[in-house]
């Protein structure tokens, strides 16, 4: 398949006319109409093995374009007529990226608009429909680009001609899948969960979950059964598959404060996702007790950390504290506020002590005093921002 961003400076390469055409087409998607002599030379020089199964992805912007294509395709019983060369791949995964979106060799406003709408709607494909075609290389029809010095991506180029193909896979928008009367929201979430619980998460259902999460919020909020499914999917993303076990604490040198020796970053990591689904109204009532226990456990761990690692030399990376307080008991929510204030307050008094101020006042050299004041202000600033709350 062609990728302009991988273009090589083939002008500096020692290439004859045939290889120069191959480079120009493969890396810049230019000149799709080689002379008969060049096409014949390349199929002999780099012949694709007869019988090789290859795939090509195609994307259609509108329903009208798709209907026109599929109508002619069926009328011709899958035989396509190529007036120019076309790129195929031995890897259907490589072909898929051309089925879900159009390659942007030359960025246009229409292409950017389609991509933006796709991202905004969390859709699987840009445009209306995509398809992956499959065919088999016949004698003297294919150029194996990998056999040349220009090879990449298992690319096979078919010269102009007629080719019998089959549809390997049709790529639909999530909206069209959900419109299928046989596909319900609960059914899709079951498939997402099955994918999450498998050894390798299916990228298709990973994206489908984000689509459902974004577009079907009201449906989920009105159903405890759907909330239970969302909760199970969220838990399935955790390594231990248990919320209570997902609490990681690390203390390591804060290299991003290069001017402060022995400065450490204390990170409290937990399963934020389970709290996020609650913020979206997707947490089932049956799990509120579990969430409170988990929030309390995190806050208690944080309190122990502050006792152990207290002082201006520590920076606490503790994200989503406000989110935690919403699910913690009132006692633990108050505890969280207190330990944050104590940590910052204690460090501030340590930095802003009379002893530190007297040291600066004792400096007589103006330049040295200015540098000392700048360092002092920097310490105060770091102390007041000692706890990162995302």
Image: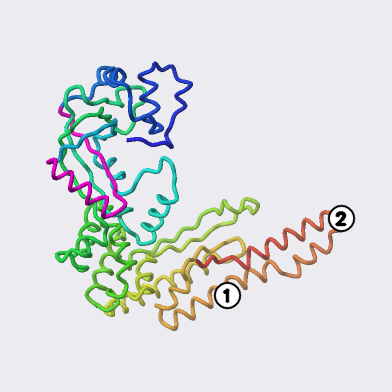
Q: How crowded is mark 2: few (under 14 residues within 10 Å), some or many (20 or more)?
A: few
In this view, the residue farthest toward the bottom is: 330
Residue 262: x and y in percent read 60, 54
Q: In which quarter of the image is the N terminus?
A: top left
Q: Is residue 63 magenta?
A: yes
Which residue appears at 13% of the width and 44% of the height? 75
Which residue appears at 76% of the width and 67% of the height? 355
Which residue appears at 26% of the width and 55% of the height? 63
Residue 295: x and y in percent read 39, 73
Magenta residue span: 51-77
SS at mark 1 in the image:
helix
Which residue appears at 38% of the width and 36% of the height? 3
Q: How many marks?
A: 2
- Cα–Cα span, label 2 and label 1: 37 Å
Find disc 1 in the rendering and name its residue.
341
For residue 72, side relative to residue 361 (left or right): left
Q: Which of 144 and 42 is in front in this view?
A: 42
Q: Which of 73 and 372 is in front in this view?
A: 73
SS at mark 2 in the image:
loop
Q: Quadrant of residue 44 in the image? A: top left
Find disc 2 in the rendering and name its residue.
365
Q: Is residue 66 above or below residue 84?
A: below
Residue 78: x and y in percent read 15, 40
Q: Does the magenta stretch include residue 43?
A: no
Nearer-N-terminus badge (2/1): 1
Q: Residues within 10 Å of mark 1 (few under 14, many from 20)?
A: few
Q: In this view, does 255 lie above or below 95?
A: below
For residue 336, side relative to residue 126 (left or right): right
Q: Quadrant of residue 175 in the image? A: bottom left
């Amino acid at each position: 398949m062609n990728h302009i961003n991988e273009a090589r400076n083939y002008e500096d390469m020692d290439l004859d006319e045939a290889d120069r055409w191959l480079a120009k087409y493969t890396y810049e998607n230019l000149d799709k109409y080689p002379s008969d002599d060049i096409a014949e030379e390349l199929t002999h020089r780099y012949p694709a093995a007869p019988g090789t199964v290859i795939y090509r992805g195609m994307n259609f912007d509108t329903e009208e374009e798709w209907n026109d294509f599929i109508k002619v395709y069926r009328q011709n019983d899958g035989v396509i007529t190529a007036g120019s060369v076309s790129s195929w791949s031995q890897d259907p995964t490589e072909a898929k990226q051309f089925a879900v979106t159009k390659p942007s060799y030359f960025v246009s406003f229409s292409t950017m608009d389609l991509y933006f709408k796709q991202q905004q709607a969390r859709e699987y494909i840009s445009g209306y429909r995509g398809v992956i075609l499959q065919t088999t290389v016949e004698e003297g029809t294919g150029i194996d680009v990998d056999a040349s010095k220009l090879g990449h991506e298992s690319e096979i180029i078919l010269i102009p001609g007629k080719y019998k193909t089959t549809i390997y896979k049709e790529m639909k928008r999530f909206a069209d899948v959900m419109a299928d009367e046989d596909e319900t929201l609960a059914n899709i979430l079951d498939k997402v969960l099955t994918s999450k619980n498998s050894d390798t998460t299916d990228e298709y259902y990973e994206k489908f979950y984000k689509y459902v999460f974004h577009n079907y919020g009201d449906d989920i909020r009105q159903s405890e059964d759907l909330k239970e499914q969302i909760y199970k999917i969220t838990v399935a993303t955790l390594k231990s598959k248990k919320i209570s076990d997902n609490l990681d604490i690390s203390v390591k040198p804060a290299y991003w404060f290069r001017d402060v020796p022995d400065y450490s970053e204390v990170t409290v990591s937990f399963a934020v996702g389970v709290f996020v689904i609650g913020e979206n109204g997707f947490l089932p009532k049956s799990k509120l007790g579990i969430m409170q226990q988990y929030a309390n456990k995190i806050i208690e761990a944080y309190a122990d950390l502050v006792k152990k690692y207290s002082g201006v030399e520590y920076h606490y990376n503790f994200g989503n504290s406000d989110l935690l307080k919403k699910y913690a008991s009132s006692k633990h929510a108050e505890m969280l506020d207190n330990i944050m204030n104590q940590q910052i307050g204690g460090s501030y008094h340590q930095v802003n002590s009379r002893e530190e101020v007297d040291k600066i006042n004792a400096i007589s050299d103006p330049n040295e005093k200015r540098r000392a004041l700048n360092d002092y202000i920097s310490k105060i600033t770091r102390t007041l921002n000692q706890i990162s709350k995302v």
